[in-house]
Structures are given as C-alpha cells and as structure tokens.
Amino acid sequence: MRAQRGPVPWAAVTRGALAAGPLLLAALLAGRASLGVVAAIAAMLAGINDRPGSRRTSVRRIGVPALAGAVGLLVGSYAGAHLGAFALTLVLTGLGLVGGGISAIGPVASGTGTQLLVTSAVGAGMPLPDPVWQTVPAFLAGAGWLLALRLLLPTPVSRTGDPRAGRGRGPYRPDSRFAPRPDKRSDPRPDPRPEPRPGPRPDVRLDFRFDGERAAVAEVYEAVAALLDAAGTEHAGARRAALTAALDHAQDALAGPRLRRHPSSAAERRLHAQYAAALPLGEAATALAWAERTVPKRAAEGPRRLAAAVRGNSLAGPLPAPARTDPALRALDAALLHAAEVFDRGRAPDLHTRRQSVAALVRTVLGAGGREYALRAGLCFGAAVATAQALHHGHWYGAHQHWYWLPATAVFLVKPDLGPLVSRVLCRAAGTVLGALLFAGFAAVLPRPEGLVVLVAVCGALVPVAARHFAAQTTVVTVLVLALVMVGGEPQASAGRIGETLLACAIVLIVGHLPVPGQRGGGVRARIDAADAAAHAYLVHVLGESDDRAARWTLRREAYRTLAEARAAIARAAAELPALARHSAGADEVAAVLERLVDTTTACAVHLDDTGRLTPRHTERLAALRDELATRRGGVGRSRTLA
C-alpha cells in the first residue's frame, strides 16, 4: 500500500507525452481514428513497461510484451468474430493458462503474459471497424514508436558531465590524506601498487547511448561503499541486500539483447570491464561485513571515487589505500588495485552470467510454481470472460456493447508477481472510481476531439510518475483509456466502468482464494529450491578450492540473485490473506539461513584465497548453518545444501 519514492523520471515523462497523444492526433488528421486508438493503447501499455535501465534492456522489456500483445490482439479479434460465447470463453481461458504459466519465468515474461491477456480481451470485446491486418500493425507501430523514443532520445543527465567525476590521472595510488599509519601488524609483503604515471585526461563527453548502463555500474560501486560503511552494524544485512539488487540491475543492464556476441564499441567494453571489476570489491566487502567488525572510513572512499569515475566516464585518479591487516582488507586492497587498472585500460570480460536454456524455461513453466500461477490466472481470467459474456448477451451493458473492461481488469488484479491480491484489489477499486469520476468531469467541459487528445497526452506523461503506486497508476490509466474509447466513438461510460471494476474485484477475490488441486505455495517453494541449489553449487565450488575465479563469481551472482528473487516472492506471499499466506509459512526463515550460508561461503572464499585454509570460526559457522537449515526446512521445498 506504500508509494515508492524517488526523483521524477523526466525522460520517461517526456516519452509518455510524445507517445499516445501525438499518435492519436496523427490518426485523427488522417481520418483513421480507430487505428489511432489501437496505436495509442499500445503506446500506453509500452509506457507501463518503460522502466529505468539501459536502452538495450528496454528492447526486451518493451518489445517482447508488445509482440505478445499483437498475438493476443490477433487471437482475440478472430475468436470474438467467429466463436460463440461458450467457445470464446474456453479459448480465452486456455490463453489465460498460457499467459499465467509463462509469467512465472521472470519480470519480462510476466509483462508478456499480461499484455497477451489484456489485448486478447480487447480484441474480442472491443470490435473495431478496421480489418485485423490493419489493427495488428497499428498496435505494433504504437509500441514501436515509444520504443524508438526510448532508444533515440537522450536523457537530461547524459548531456552534462557529473561534477563528482574523478579528475586525477593515472591508475591506483595511495592518497596521502588516507595513507594508513605504520602498524606492526601490517602485512609484511611488499606493496604491489605501481608508481604513479601520467595518463590521458578524463573524457567528460558522455555517450548517452550508455547512460543507463553507466548509472547502473556506478550504483554498484556506491552500494559497495555503503556496505563497507555499515560493516559491524545492524544495517549490514540491508546494505548487502542493496548490493545484490545493484549488481542484479547492472548485470541486466549490460546483458541486454545485441546483434553481436560481444560488445562492439570501446565505451561499452569499458563498462563491462568496470562492472566485472566491482565483483571482487563486493566479495571483499561482504567478507568484511560477515566478520561483524567496523571498517576504517577510508576503506569506503575508494569505491565512491570509482563510482564518480564511472558516472563521469573518467579515470579513477588517486584512491585511498585501506590497511592490509587481515585477509578481507587485503582482498579489498587487491580489488581496488585491480579496479584502478581496469579503469585505466579495461577490456570487456565475461558478465559472469549464464543464459537459461529452453529446457530450463519449460521446466519453470511446467513446474509447481508455473502450474499454480497458470491455474490462478487462467481461472480468474476465464471467470471474468464468462461473466462479461453473460452480461453482454443479456444486454446489461446498455448503450455501449464493449465488454473487454471486466476481463482486462481481472488480468491486472490476479498477477501474483505484481503484489498482494487484496491490496491490489483495494487500490484498483479506489483508482478506477477516482479516474472515472475525473473523466466524467473532463468529458463535460473539454472540446472534442482536440480536448481529449490533450488529455491523452497529459495522462501519457503522468504514467511514469503514477507507477509509484498502483492506485495512482490505475487512476491515470482509467482516464486515458476512457478518453481513447470516446475518441473511437464510444459514449461516456464512467458509471459502467466503475461497476465492471468492482465486479472484477469481487471475482478475483473469490476465485483467487478458492482451494485448487495440488500443493499451494508452489511459487515460493520453487524459488526456495532454486536458491538452495544455487547456494549448494557455490559452496561446493568454494570448498573445492578451485582457482577459477570467473566461475566462482558466476556462481556467487546466481546464488545471491536467486535468493533475492525468493525473498521477493516470500514477501509478496506473506502479505496475502491468511488463506494464501499460510502456505508459505516458514519460507522466510529458510531464506534467511540460506543468505547467511552464502555470506559465510563468500567469507570462506576470501580467506582461502589469502591463507589457503579455513579457521575454526568458518567451519563452526558452516556446521551451525547446516544444522539450522535441516531444522527449518520442514515441508518448504527440498534441501540440497545438506548434501
């Protein structure tokens, strides 16, 4: 129920203002209002998927759901035109099962499933005067227009340099203000740092094509610094989770779709190298946080200067040298040295990620989590379609004959990955009532159609800001859609939309909480199993004392990523009503044990690198975690780490 916070995404606001409104205006000027409505709906849906990140990832995040939306529009249009009520309900229910099942794969797949179902409902329930071979290209053109804006328009920040960017020359060298004092406990080995040498001046001309990647990599270094600051305090766990989120975001930003296997530009290769250089820094910071003792303030200054250098596309400059008094601090010092060399002349290494095979994706869709997701989404969507068909053929709709609103609303409500069911129902109901009332007022005073076109453009600009809260987003989208359908020739129908929304809320609440065949909580159990398997693979690799650092970092990234996904699924399930929340009871404690196990494994890896053997504290902690995991697992998934 809480709203997200953050700065106003002005770039997304600009894209929203230039998307649906101008498309609708161009269609009206060309005398093709119905095609303009379809293109504007596509632009609106693409705007909902227009999230912060790199331009490359936006191709997948916007483009893949748009293609699924075109398929849904095609299937829905043909089914609505040629099938009776019963057959149409069966077809759309089957489509709901498919859309729900693929949504279990991940966020992009979830957006794909959502758009598939929404457009199938629109195609079947809002018959358009144009043939399908024209409406489907119009839909793709609308989504493609917003995607083109996302790829071509520079963001405001990318046109100016970052004042925090490093301005020094040359690679890593100790700053006299932060130089450690002589300490007889210091590492007796010679200092491996090179002597300062001249280097090229920083390049403050930023390439806006990579502003998303640059911001994501800089946030990783900031998160490393924040974790070092929090070491030895009660905030260390939250900061380590924030580091995981930053690494996940940067990895996704850099690993977007590309035509070539490897980065083709020097700027992109440099960013890949800078991301990879942050991995050993994160490993050392995690080991220091695991040790539960404070770290000197100067230790966090180096990662912060590296973050500024990433933002400014410059060299690292002088970096403070942390004291080399224990294995974790020595690992941090070595990681800083490596990062400075990479910033000076980095190459593009592997991103330490592995693509999921088609077989793995199929197993996810057909697994317990995918089956539960598909059944829940399919039943709710099918029930909404059946109810809408009954009302439609019973002539309950009055002046307007379009019945798409009821099943489309059910789709946005039932998706488990979009938030707890009850809170979304309450937000949707409140947002629809407010949006319908606002539109009724606007429709009474605005000239047509020019006033409605302006209203569509304003709402398109507000969508990125309203995305911070589901009720606010619902309000804006309701006004936008009602304006679009009125431009398309439908009479003012605010009261009917309120009634249909409340009916959809009731259907989702009832059907979503009905007992279903099989074991409930399958989505949470599947996430826990994946996190357990990843933690087990990481632990086996580290205890095997392999020298393959790249494989270790890949396994560590997978372990932390799967844990973050499990934590998110558990948090959503815990916020449901008791009828649903009880099926995931105990999962949060298991995830907490797995997190401590992965943190301990990271600390073991750092210590083994330095000394070649583990201390009694490491082995005792691993044994204690093994016993605690055995106690807490119970019926929550299967255990692999106990092996």
Image: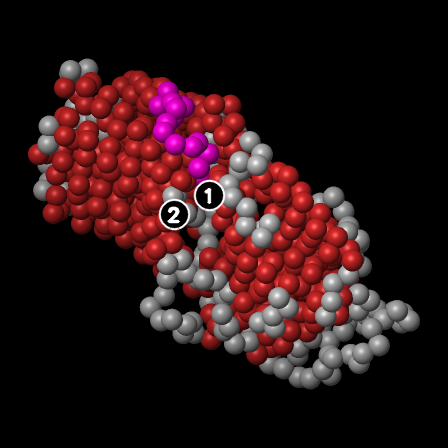
Residue 299 as seen in the image, left or right of residue 540: right
Q: Give the image quarter of residue 360.
A: bottom left
Task: Please name the residue that numbered disc 2 is placed on.
Answer: 364
| Left or right side of 241 for 254 | left
Q: Is residue 623 above or below residue 99?
A: below
Q: Is residue 573 above or below residue 66?
A: above
Q: Identify which residue is drawn at 49% across, 49% down.
A: 530
> Marks 2 and 1: CB-CB under 8 Å?
yes
Question: Where does the magenta region start and end?
Answer: 510-523
Visible residue check, residue 560 = no
150 horizontally vs 555: left or right: left
Is the residue 431 above or below the residue 296 in the image?
above
Quarter-of-image position of residue 300: bottom right
Q: Magenta includes 515? A: yes
Q: Is residue 631 at all visible to an observer of this figure?
A: yes
Q: Which residue is mark 1?
A: 526
Looking at the picture, the colour scheme in use is secondary structure
Residue at screen point 46% across, 57% down: 252
- Residue type indicated by callout 1: Ala
| Local crowd size for mark 2, using a 10 Å CA cut-off: few (<14), some (14–19), many (≥20) | many
Dominant SS type (magenta): loop
Find residue 113 and report its horizontal and vertical position in percent: 32, 42
Residue depicted at 70% across the width and 51% down the height: 623
Foreground: 293 or 362?
Answer: 362
Q: Residue at x 58, y 39 (%)?
A: 633
Calculate the distance from the C-alpha at mark 2 to the C-alpha at mark 1.
8 Å
Label 2: state its secondary structure: helix
Disc 1 residue crowd, few under 14, some 14–19, many 20+, Cα 10 Å: many
Residue 68 percent location from the top left of the image: 26, 47
The type of residue carrying mark 2 is Thr
Task: Point out which mark residue 259 bears.
Answer: none
- Residue 582 higher or lower than 557, as above or below: above
